[in-house]
Amino acid sequence: MSGEQGDDTLYGGPGDDQLYGGVGDDVLRGDSGDDTLYGDNRGGGRFDGGKDRLYGGPGTDGLDGGPADDFVQRD
């Protein structure tokens, strides 16, 4: 699931999810499962990143806030 140009809030479900915040100050919340959360566009782009907040949830999660000052919490 991917965010748009502005500030987005994305929620994962009970399975394994991939969430991409995109441009803006985004909030991404994984759920149970092994989630991958990227605060920027596609994980590794290192451009147009906002001040994102990533919350992994239960499971083994990969969290990458991007280039700006981000808050990251595994669970």
Image (tube, rainbow, N blue to C red):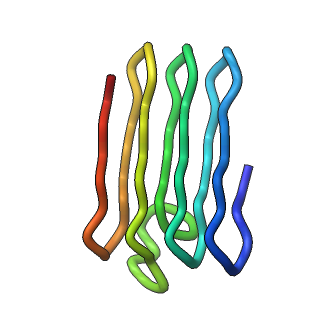
Q: Is residue 29 left or right of residue 44?
A: right
- Judged from this view, the residue extending furthest toward the bottom is 48
Q: Nearer the viewer, residue 10 or 36?
A: 10
Q: Is residue 15 left or right of residue 60?
A: right
Looking at the image, is 38 positioned above or below residue 75? Answer: below
Q: Is residue 11 left or right of residue 65?
A: right
Residue drawn at the location 36% of the way across and 59% of the way down: 65
* Horizontal and vertical percent position of residue 12: 66, 32
* Horizontal and vertical percent position of residue 57: 45, 23
Q: Quadrant of residue 73?
A: top left
Q: Quadrant of residue 49?
A: bottom left
Q: Which image quarter holds the C terminus?
A: top left
Residue drawn at the location 48% of the way across and 54% of the way down: 38
* Horizontal and vertical percent position of residue 61: 41, 29
Residue drawn at the location 56% of the way across and 64% of the way down: 42
Q: Nearer the viewer, residue 25 or 37?
A: 25
Looking at the image, is 2 positioned above or below residue 73? Answer: below
Q: Is residue 62 left or right of residue 72?
A: right
Residue drawn at the location 62% of the way across and 71% of the way down: 7
* Horizontal and vertical percent position of residue 36: 50, 39
Mark count? 0
Looking at the image, is 48 positioned above or below residue 62? Answer: below
